[in-house]
Amino acid sequence: MKKLGKNNKVLIIAEAGINHNGNLKIAKKLIDVCKNIGADAVKFQTFKAENVISKFATKLNYQKNKRSDKQSQLEMLKSFELSDKEFLKLKKYCEKKKIIFMSTPKDLESAEFLNKIKMKIFKIGSGEANNYELINKISNFNKKTIISTGMCTLDEVKKIYKIFKGKKKKNLCLLHCTSLYPCPSDECNLSAIITMKNFFDVDIGFSDHTIGIDASIGAVALGSRIIEKHITLDKKMKGPDHKASLDPVEFEILIKKIRLMERMIGNPQKKPTQNEKKNIKLIRRGLVYKEDLAPGYTLRRSDIQIKRPMLALKPDDLPKVIGKKLRNKVYKDQPIILKHFK
C-alpha cells in the first residue's frame, strides 16, 4: 500500500459520502471542489437502501433534523441513492478531472457493480467491519482495499487482517476510526494508530469524524498513511453528515497542513541534514589554548578551553593532548592541533 498516494505521500480522501443529497449535479460539484483543493481522491457511498436497512431501523440522533423527526433510516437513505448510471458518470467525470474515484459499497450487489466498472480502490466502512461475507467478496477482487475499524476491538481487526492473508495482504490498509458523528476529542484515541502499526504489517490510516482538522494532522504525525475526512459544499445544507464535515476552505487548509506535516516528519534516520552539516564547525566547540604558552611547556587540562568554532580538535580529543609538550609558542584562543606537540 506504500504507493497509494502520489510520490509516496499521504493519500488524502475527501469523503463526499451522501453529501450530494441524491443530486448528480451536486456530486459533480463536489468532485470539482475536491480536485481544486488538492485532494487525491473523492469518495461516495454506493448502496441499494432496501439491501442495507430494514424498515424498522430508526434514525440515529445525529441524523435527525429535530427531536420529533419520525422518518426511518430506510426512507432517509432512499433519498440519497444514486443509480448505477449516475455512478458510472461520476467515475468518468473523476477520470476526466484526474482525481481518484472511490465509493464505499454497502452491499454485495453494489460491490459487484463497482468492480464491474473497474473502480481501482475499494473502501469498506466501519459499519461493515464484521460483514465478513462482503469483506471476503471484495478481497477476492484483488484490488487495493481500505477498511475502517470504528467500533472494533483489536481481536475483530485481527479477523479482518486474516482474510487478507498471503498475497492479498499487499492490498489491505486499515483505518483507525471512532464511529461517533461528531467524535469528541477525548474519544478520538489517536494512540490506537500506534497499536495498529505494531500489530499489523500493512499501512495504517485514520478516518476522522472530529470537528476541525487537528486530529488528522496528529494522525499523520503518528504515522498515518491515509487520511479520510468528510467534505460538504455547505454545512447548512440539509442532510445528516453536513454539520460534521469540512467546507472547501477548511478542507484546503487541512491538505496544506498535512503536506507541511509530511515535510516536517522527513527522514526517520537520525543524522545531520545537508544544511546542518554546513553549520557544524560554526556551532560546535573545539579545543583552544586558554593563554599564551612557551615551547617545551607540558599541557594541562587547565590550559585548555572549549570554544566556538570547532576549527581543529574536538572536545573528545582532550586525552590526546593533555600531558604533551609543545614544540613552539602558542597563543590564547588558537585552535589546538596535534602538530603543536613533540
Image (cartoon, rainbow, N blue to C red):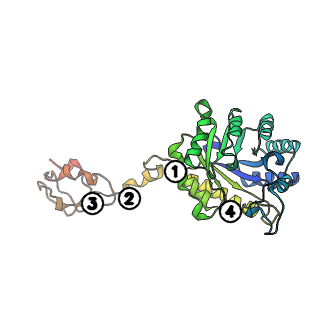
Q: Amino acid at mark 2?
A: Ile
Tell me which numbered mark, 2 or 3, is placed earlier along the sequence: 2
- Tag 4 near tag 3, CB within 8 Å: no
Viewer-nearest of discs 4 and 1: 4
Q: CA distance from mark 1 to mark 3?
A: 42 Å
Q: Amino acid at mark 3?
A: Ile
Viewer-nearest of discs 1 and 3: 1
Viewer-nearest of discs 1 and 2: 1
Q: Amino acid at mark 1?
A: Ile
Label annotation for residue 194: 1
Q: CA distance from mark 2 to mark 3?
A: 12 Å
Tell me which numbered mark, 4 or 2, is placed earlier along the sequence: 4
- Residue holding disc 3: 306
Instruction: Tell me if residue 258 comes above or below residue 158 in the rendering.
Output: below
Q: CA distance from mark 4 to mark 3?
A: 57 Å
Q: Considering the numbered disc 2 on the image, is that residue within a helix, a strand or a loop?
A: helix
Q: Where does the image place residue 245, in percent across and percent down from the top left?
A: 73, 60
- Residue holding disc 4: 182
Q: Where does the image place residue 331, in percent across and percent down from the top left?
A: 22, 60
Viewer-proximal residue, 99 or 339?
Answer: 99
- Residue holding disc 2: 283
Label 2 crowd bin: few (<14), some (14–19), many (20+), radius 10 Å: few
Tell me which numbered mark, 1 or 3, is placed earlier along the sequence: 1
Position of the N terminus, as image quadrant, is top right
Q: Where does the image place residue 193, in percent across and percent down from the top left?
A: 55, 51
Q: Amino acid at mark 4?
A: Pro
Q: Considering the numbered disc 3 on the image, is that residue within a helix, a strand or a loop?
A: strand
Q: Considering the numbered disc 4 on the image, is that residue within a helix, a strand or a loop?
A: loop
Q: Residue at x 22, y 48 (%)?
A: 338
